[in-house]
Amino acid sequence: MTERLAPLIAAFFFGGVALWVPIEKLFLDDIGFTPQTIGVMAAAYAALVPLLEVVSGILADRWSRRGVLVIGNLGAFASVLIGGLSDSVWMYVVAAMFLGVYFAMQSGTFDAIVYDTVLEETGSSDRFESVVGRVRMAESASLTLGALAGGVLAAATAPRVTYFATLPFLAVSTMFLLRFREPRLHEVAERHSLGEHVAITVRALIRQRRLLPIAALLILTALLTQAVFEFGPLWLVDADASAGSFGPAWAALMVSLGLGGLLAGRVHFERWPSLVIVSVVLVGGGLTLVLAQNPAVATTAQAVLALLAIAIGIYLTRLLHDAIPSDIRSGVSSTVGAGSWIVFLPFSLTFGAVSERWGVHTAGAMILGIVGAVIALLVVVVVGARRGDLVTLEPAAELEMAEEVEAVVAYERAAA
C-alpha cells in the first residue's frame, strides 16, 4: 500500500508548498484590504465552494476521483497566478474564487480516494485514520517549510514574489497526481442517471438519521479549522507584528495540521477520559483567543484548536465512510463539506465586521462559541458510538466486485 500511495503523498507534499500563504494578509493590506473586505473576500469563495463541491463529489463518483483532484490543482494554479498579478481588491477576489475551485474539488474527493485505497489494499477501514495522518503529515511538512521559506523570501524580496515562486511546486504536484493509480470501488455499483444519483446521495444522509450528528460535527470542526486558518493572522496584524513573524506563526499552524493527522489514529475519542481532556483543552484555546494580548500566545492557541479539530474530523470521516457505499462516497462527503462552506459564509462576514468595529479579540468570542458547539455534539456522537448506534457496511462485496472491474480493465489494456 505504501508504494501505491507514494504518488498521492508526493502530490500533497508539493501542493502544500504555498510560499504566499504566510504573508497573504500582509500583501492584502498592501493592496488596500481591510478586515471587513477580507471577510467579504472569504465570503465570496465560501459562496462559490458549496455550488461546486456537491457537483465535484458526484463527478468524482461517476467519472474519476484523480481527475477531479487534477482539476482542483489547475484551479489553485490559476488562483496563485492571478493573486500574484493583483494590484486591487477586486482582482484578488477573482483569485480567491479560483482558490474556491481548488477547495471544492479536493475536500470530499480526497477522503474518498484514501478510504477506498485503504479498503482495496487491506480489506477494512481500520488503517484509514493512520493513512490520512501520513498524508496530512507530508502536507504539513511542506506547508511548514513553505511558511518559513515564504516569510524569508518575502522579507528578502517582496510579498508578491512568493506567489510566482509557488507555481512550479503546483506543476510538480499535478504530475504526481497523474501517476497515482486510483481505486475502482466506486465503479462497481449499478449506474444510475444523474438525477437518480443526486437523489441517492441526498437520501443517504437524510434517511440515516444516526449520521446527522456526525455530519453536523464535521461541519463544525471544518468551520473551526477554516476560521483559525483564515482569520488567525489578524491577531498578528492587530499586534503590529513584523513581516518576518508571519512565517513562523503560519508554520505553527501548519505543524498542527500534521500533528492533528498523527493524533487522529491515537486518541480514542469514544473514551470518557479522552473526551474530557479534549474538551478542556478546546475551551482553554477558545478563551485564550478572547483574552490573550500576546500574539505568540494567541498563535499557540490557534494551533491547538486546529490540531484537535483536524483529529476529530478524521475520526468522524471514518465513521461517515464506514456507513456509505463507495459509489456515492465522494458525493456524500462533498455534501457535508459544502455544508461547512455554507455556514462559513455568514460567519466570515460577521467575523470581519465584528473584528473591524470592536477588535479581533471580541470577534474571537465567535470561535469560542464554535468550540462549545463542537464539544456538545462530540458528546452526542460518542454516546451513540458507545451504544452501537452506528451501522457499518461490509466491504467484502464491494471488494469482490472491484477485483472483477480490475480484471476487465487489465484485459482491455492487454487487448489494446
Image: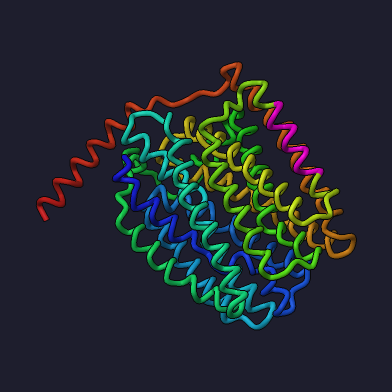
Image quarter where the N terminus lies is top left
Residue 176 visible at all = yes
Question: Residue lying farthest top?
Answer: 387
**Nearest to the observer: residue 106 or residue 149:** 149
- From the viewer's perspective, is residue 72 above or below residue 224? below
Image quarter where the C terminus lies is bottom left
Task: Judge whether residue 251 is colored magenta.
Answer: no
Q: Position of residue 302 (x, y in %)?
A: 70, 49
Q: Is residue 379 left or right of residue 355?
A: left
Q: Is residue 162 left or right of residue 227?
A: left
Give the residue drawn at x 61%, y 34%: 214
**Nearest to the observer: residue 111 or residue 283:** 283
Give the residue drawn at x 66%, y 68%: 244
Q: Position of residue 279 (x, y in %)?
A: 72, 32
Give the residue drawn at x 43%, y 26%: 393
Task: Judge whether residue 285 is colored magenta.
Answer: yes
Give the residue drawn at x 48%, y 53%: 139
Q: Main secondary structure of the magenta part?
A: helix
Boundaries of the magenta span = 276-287
Q: Is residue 245 left or right of residue 240?
A: left
Q: Is residue 160 left or right of residue 395?
A: right
- From the viewer's perspective, is residue 199 above or below residue 415? above
Question: Residue lying farthest left?
Answer: 415
Residue 195 visible at all = no
